[in-house]
Image: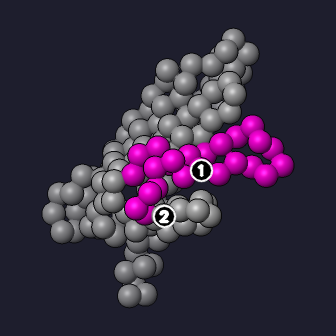
């Protein structure tokens, strides 16, 4: 299993950051309920191969989803560590299940052709998250 882990210090409260995850969950999971979030899932309507499920949810602390099909799965975990009222450490972990031989070959080809893109994707995620938090703070 391959794992990518990174972290960032954000100048926002864990509550404000987690509210962004809740907003996203409400948009992406029609049956989302904060009190019973774990186990909530969606599948593509015309393509039943992919399932996205909330696998861990602790308000203001952990938001974890698993994306899977019959051959592989990815677990994306966001963990918030409260530092003080205006600072939070975000720990991002993405784990990829072991693939069958064709998946492994495809993974190697993608890595050779496109390089390792996860750090760039994480940095873009952090920039977008900070932008949304700043906009929310300005509009409050």
Number of numbered tags placed on the structure image: 2
User: Tell me, what colour scheme is on the image?
Assistant: one colour
- Please provide percent x and percent y for residue 52: 61, 46
Q: Where's residue 139, x and y in %?
A: 43, 87
Residue at (39% x, 52% y) in the render: 57
What secondary structure is marked by label 1? strand
The residue singled out by tag 1 in the image is 41
Residue linked to disc 2: 33
Can you name the residue that lies furthest to the right here?
A: 46
Q: Name the residue at 51% across, 47% down.
A: 39
The answer to which of marks 1 and 2 sits earlier in the sequence is 2
Q: Residue furthest front?
A: 36
For the residues labelled 1 and 2, the Cα–Cα distance comes to 11 Å
* Nearest the eye: 89 or 57: 57
- Compare residues 85 and 69 and report the one nearer the observer: 69
Can you say whether 137 is above or below 86 in the image?
below
Is 55 in the magenta?
yes
Residue appearing at x 17%, y 57% in the figure: 83
Which label sits on residue 72?
A: none
Image quadrant in which the C terminus is located:
bottom left
Query: Which of the pair 77/126 is nearer the observer?
Result: 77
Magenta-tinted stretch: 34-57
Q: Quadrant of residue 19?
A: bottom left
């Amino acid at each position: 299993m391959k794992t990518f882990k990174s972290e960032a210090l954000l100048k926002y409260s864990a509550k404000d950051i987690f509210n962004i995850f809740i907003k996203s969950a409400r948009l992406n999971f029609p049956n989302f309920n904060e009190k019973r979030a774990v186990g909530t899932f969606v599948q593509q309507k015309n393509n039943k191969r992919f399932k996205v499920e909330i696998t861990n949810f602790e308000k203001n602390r952990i938001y974890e989803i698993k994306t899977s099909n019959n051959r592989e799965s990815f677990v994306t975990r966001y963990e918030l560590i409260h530092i003080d009222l205006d600072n939070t450490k975000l720990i991002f972990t993405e784990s990829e299940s072991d693939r069958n031989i064709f998946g492994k070959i495809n993974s190697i080809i993608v890595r050779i052709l496109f390089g390792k893109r996860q750090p760039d994707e994480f940095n873009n995620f952090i920039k977008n998250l900070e932008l949304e938090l700043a906009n929310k703070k300005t509009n409050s």
